[in-house]
Amino acid sequence: MIKQIHYILAFFFFALGLALHFLPDYDYLLLHFFNSKFYNPDFFKYFTEIGNGFIAAAFVIPLLSLVSDKFKAFNFVPLSALIFPTIYMGLINSFLKKEFFAFERPGFYEFENIKYLEPVFKYDSFPSGHAATIFVIVFIWLGLAVKKGFKYKSYLYGILITLASFVALSRVIIGAHWMSDILASIGIAFLFRAFVDLKSFYNHITQSKVLKYLSYVVVLTAWANILFFDISDYF
């Protein structure tokens, strides 16, 4: 039942996001609330990028892997265990956004009461890639790194999930996504957390020597894109 809970949560959040999308008045109210109360372009133009796949691969994933390696309280989590589930999620997420759920972003409607952070995108809204990326990374890292009986487990879970939630909410705050997109992204993240409990998937992302070396390639590629290309195109 403990392992099945991730599938249940995946279905629940994705279905909740989809249901909210078909209640546009409520989706707009949530968008307007967070946008009007918390919008700060000087802060969020940087903070929201924590969920950008290139930033995650260059900074977030290596940092979490390093922390798990340096502290005895954690199990070591290799780069591949975080990078490749994120890549697989990104491919699925892109398919859903472009081919299955052709939903428009808030920017498509050009609401007068909503402040948008540049660049403003109008399509490929559901689910949010940034939100799914940060939740997949946090859920999988917590599942693999934290040892049973870890004294500060509840605090660590609370801090990282709160951080991931704030990054995800930043997509609503800057007018890039609807709340429904965020909820669906949480569902996708729980699905990939459930996959980690499958022995074949676990061995694939943690034991494969090919993925181990490809992980370094991905990190270097992410750095190259950050330094030489406009990664904001991947909002």
Image: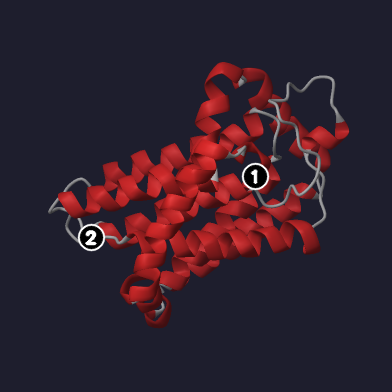
Vertically, is 149 above or below 130?
A: below
| Residue at 41% over, 55% down | 139
| Residue at 36% over, 66% down | 213
Residue 175 position, x and y percent, is 70, 30
Vertically, is 66 above or below 38?
A: below
| Residue at 52% over, 20% down | 43
Q: Name the outermost residue toward the front.
A: 228
| Label disc, if present, on residue 177 of the rendered structure | none
Residue 146 position, x and y percent, is 25, 56
Return the residue at label 1.
234
Q: Quadrant of residue 3?
A: bottom left
Comparing labels 1 and 2, the label whose residue is closer to the camera: 1
Q: Secondary structure at mark 2?
A: loop
| Label disc, if present, on residue 76 of the rendered structure | 2
Render colour scheme? secondary structure
Vertically, is 163 above or below 13?
A: above
Q: Amino acid at mark 2?
A: Phe
Residue 10 position, x and y percent, is 56, 63
Q: Quadrant of residue 32?
A: top right
Q: Is residue 9 visible?
A: no
**Dot 2 crowding, Cα within 10 Å, few <14, some 14–19, many 20+:** many
Vertically, is 19 above or below 121?
A: below
Q: Nearer the viewer, residue 130 or 217?
A: 217
Left or right, 120 with respect to 86, comes to right
Q: Amino acid at mark 1?
A: Tyr
The quadrant of the rendering that contains the C terminus is top right
Residue 177 position, x and y percent, is 70, 39
Answer with mark 1 or mark 2, whichever residue precedes in sequence: 2
